[in-house]
Image: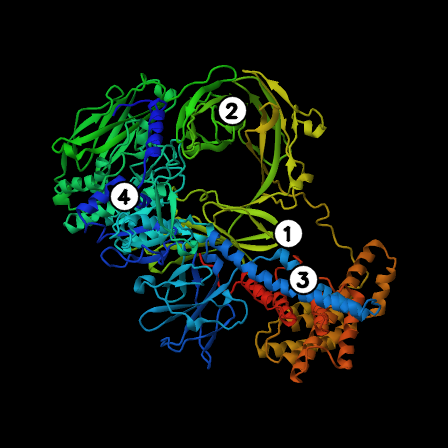
Amino acid sequence: MPSSPSESLPSEERTCTKIKSIASFRHNEASFIASLMPKKEIGADRFIESHPTYDGRGVVIAIFDSGVDPAVSGLQVTSDGKPKIIDILDCTGSGDVDTSKVVKADADGYIAGASGARLLINPSWKNPSQEWHIGCKLVYELFTETLMSRIKKERKKRWREKNQEAISIAIKDLNDFDKKNPIIKESELQRIRENLQNKLDFLKSLEKVYDDKGPIIDVVVWNDGEHWRVAIDSQSFEDGSQLGKLADFCPLTNYRTERKYGIFSKLDACSFVTNIYDEGNIVSIVTDCSPHGTHVAGIAAAFHPEEPLLNGVAPGAQLISCKIGDTRMGSMETGTGLTRALIAAVQHKCDLINMSYGEPTLLPDYGRFVNLVNEVVDKHHLLFISSAGNNGPALNTVGAPGGHTESNECVGYKETLGFDRSSRGPTADGDLGVCISAPGGAVAPVPTWTLQSRMLMNGTSMASPSACGGVALIISAMKAEGLFVSPYTLRKALENTAMPISDVPIEKLTMGQGVMQVDRAYEYIQQSKSVPSVCYKVFISPSGRSSPISRGIYLRGGCACQEATEWTIQVVPRFHEDASYLEEVVPFEEYIRLQSTEKMVAQAPEYLLLTNNGRSFNIVVDPTNLSNGLHYYEVYGVDCKAPWRGPLFRVPITIIKPISPVGQPPLVSFLDVSFLPGHIERKFINVPVGATWAEAMIRTSNFDTARRFFIDTVQVCPLKRPIKWDTVVTFPSPSMKSFVLPVKGGLTMELTIAQFWSSGIGSHESTHVNFEIVFHGINISRDIVVFDGSEAAVRLEAKTLLASEKLVPSATLTKIKIPYRPVDSNFTMLSSCRDRLPSGKRIIALTLIYKLKLDEGAEVKPCIPLLNKRIYDTMHESQFYAILDSNKRIYAVGDAYPKYVKLPKGIYTIQLRIRHENVQILEKMKQLILFIERKLDKKEHIGLSFFSQPDGHFKNNGTFKSTVIVPGGSEAFYVAPPSSEKLPKCSSPGAVLLGSASYGTISLGSKRKEQKKQQYPVSYVIPPLKVDEEKGKNSPIGTNTVAERMEEEVRDTKLRFLSTVSRGNKEERQAWKELCASLKKQYPKYTPLLASILDGLLSGYVEEDKIAHNKEIVSVSNEVIESVNQEELAEFFLFKPDHEAEEAEKIKKKMELTRDQLAQALYQKGLALAELFEANNKSREETTALKSPERQDSFEENFKELKKWVDVKSPSYGLLFVTHERLFKRLGTALKVLCDLISDDSQPPNRKLYDLKIQLIDEIGWPHLVSYERRWIHVRFPSCQFMF
């Protein structure tokens, strides 16, 4: 395969030819329908036409994706009448419902659901135990963002209609009152009007803050003697009655048992299935988290008997859906989901796995998931096929697991026209990255909730199932003809029979060995019956060194291409785990002929004798005579006895020779480059040593319609993800645009400019582009500035190697990172079948508990440096965290990529779960440090100062602002730590302030506007707190005698003991009361004692006789009130007697305490009186309003007394004011005050207040708001525990 630079002109000519041919092509009806589901390109149509029964029958494909909708057309049956979908699983746990609570039905056949709804059990449901497991879930937690937005819009429309009707009534009531009372003088009338106004204001305020949390569904589980059954109650989809519709539901069981599904409502049209785990204690409600998975499944195996041209590639294949995208995180895959999916694939004896998912990775062919995939392929003979990714068109963009897992067949995207976003190889360790390619676009089925039957999608996500379906055809044929199915043989057949698109190096790195050909691959398989099933593992290292080990040779950059290098290649045959030693392993011996695609560049020995123990040989790579640009070669081994087998193993060799900028500052320009739709221009530039940023300019000309370009740069760093920068620019007309990008000096940078294939496709003119890039750099002696907490400034030295640069240092601290240790940890042996590995080992979960207190609202993010940004390249199986408040409300969940979340003031629990089967690994993580990264408010940002002297920040002189550095010169200066006065209130010793610094400026465009660029990290460790100067001082000694002080100490000790006495049962409560009576005799009318008794009475209440309890509260409250000399107390606060400072402070505290005890007694008495009056009214079948003048006077007198001492609308006493207004039927005013109490953030959310709010709204007569608030109750106060 001869090599040529990627910049060659024929690429543009091919693009132009392709555009012209497409423009002249005309469809007929059949070809148009067939083009919606491409199969011709991979030979699938030819293969099925020749072998009609080898259409995937007998093959099971596991779809690792976002979930598959069982209701869509095309995924119902196979071509031979079998069920298309065997099983549907949510491997992430995002749909899990806690159903561990067990209840029994009452005499009428009703149960109380977990949501509080009264649910009727269908008498026809068989349940020998009569035990019903219950749970509930907010249905929006099961919906995609798109579906939820649509449902919210529809529901808000209906809600607003009802709320506008209520507003109209409220306005009418207010207007009628004003007409009837044009002049208001009486206070009672003023209160009535205020009440009407408050009702109207409340309704209007909800219009602004309305936030639909969606319906809540009740889940009921039982065992009918044969299977676990599930019923879903969806009555809350409709506002109104709290009586459920459970009895109308057709019960489901595990999907694989009966293959039945349900739909929540006609409005959402969302299909779901159920699976039951842990003896009915967990129910998994499975929905998809995007249309992606259904679309992928349709490409692989859809069967449309009414329109065969729309069939998927393998219409006879069956599927299992393994949802690895977590709905809670917007379809992001999780380690838990990936592991459970592999377990399910083995349990269902699948033949193939398709995974159109992936992420960037740090280390290729490394990690927990990679090891599990290797086990599944080697031991269970599954072929794992996955997509390359859509992060192109630059090189080194192939993702994991696609191009970074040796046991995986990575599929690229065969584009229809020119430029596409398919990720390219090579990988960081030199592997080709992409194995084969397939069509990357199709019109395929999508879920019913999208309200359409099929949709067009493009990308490698579509190419992968196309290839997977093609492989299913081959396996179907192999099974039918009794051939042994080996993923090793299949992979070799696919790669060695693929149809290359061209011999241009970039095509190889984009499409691998070419477009797969089903018919040719099957012929290869038939010819390979007697060939051993072997995978040839290739390990490459520099000659004379044992590390690093790589899978290819990758020479990227000028230094690497200046001389010839020698490499050691080790080839090791790998057999399946069940291979026979005597029949397969021992006899294995092959005579290999080594060949090079270009002997002038890659020189290898001619022959190699390969046995099962492997063999090494050396090759020499000489790039010195190559031209600038991209080059790709291979050294490969061919079986001398069976050359038809093609390459048995390949050593990929990728060489990039960059061009070097010239001038001062260094500059590279590309002039008058012609672009057509889909054309890609790729340049490799040797970034000068010392460069830290680049200023680029693109100028377009000579076109008529708008043009759109994608600009991409990539630099590859060892043991680090590539430095990638990209942008999209649109030119409505010929013009110039500029931008700045970060670079690292000494590394080769790939610059890719691509015109979108749809941009200018209707035009007959090419676009002419001039591109210029100028490199700049200011090198700082410390890339990371770390202040150790001392007062010392940090010395920095700046240099420039390329050109004169203006040095303008600036630094700001904008975040704080606080470390936390777990307060608790526990291990759980996961028991369900979904957490038992194929090896039989059970997965263990380590749950770590962290406590977080926020004194004010903040935007925070939990960070675990050991685990973050690693899904595939980590030895840990998975991680998952949840942030919950004191009421168990979930504020955020996340895993490897945590996000900021806004939290109000309060105390929070962070639960972190880590999974692995090795308990020793988990044991080492029991004290894992978690950081809370918190954004500081702008007013809290700390700007750092720069000085020309080390003590400048003490003297407050010698400020360093700016200077110009010439090439070869340097400038030293100091950056001072922040002063202690500027530290944020939330800072604590050991925390770290984070920020960034910039040192240079850039000038772009005609206005030459200066901009700060190239950010460097800055951190400041919070030092220990100052020693409190007052600490340790002796308290002033009072004037009391020793005997008097001892008596006071004894008395106070008795009071403290009283508060500790348990009151858990009847005997303990009686003993407590006797102790109270004894103490009252010893200290009659001692207010602190009586207040303590009142507190004990309130905290130790057990629901028995509520009326008697309230009477007791009134009695004890009266004792507290009577014990206080109110005249003396009032006189103190009115006149504030003059005393010595220390004595005055002591008296003030005592008086304030007495006032608070008096107010608390009046407050509790008022609440108790209200409950007594309400109970008495109910017993007489009266209304809740006070009607007896005597009762009204009693309550009102107490209320007026309380108003003398405190603000009755304050958070501490507002509940009594609400009760007061409610009893007098001023419900609007009561609701307003209650909302003010709820909005106070000094205390955690109180369920009692929210329940009272619902009661008030219900009494007013707003049922639509009652339903709305009840749904919010389940958000604020979840009734079921959080499920990982």
Disc 2/disc 3 C-alpha distance (Å): 56 Å
Q: Nearer the viewer, residue 16 or 1014?
A: 16
Q: Earlier in the sequence, mark 1 or mark 3?
A: 3
Within 10 Å of disc 4 (Cα), the crowding (few <14, some 14-19, many 20+) is many
| Residue 39, numbered label | 4
Above-or-below relation of 1018 to 1131? above
Disc 3 marks which residue? 202
Q: Earlier in the sequence, mark 1 or mark 4?
A: 4
Q: Secondary structure at mark 1?
A: loop
Disc 1/disc 3 C-alpha distance (Å): 29 Å
Disc 1 marks which residue? 855
Above-or-below relation of 649 to 317? above
Look at discs 1 and 3 and give the one toward the viewer: 3
Q: Amino acid at mark 2?
A: Met
Does residue 307 appear to the left or right of 1273 in the view shown?
Answer: left
What scheme was used to colour the molecule?
Answer: rainbow
Within 10 Å of disc 1 (Cα), the crowding (few <14, some 14-19, many 20+) is few
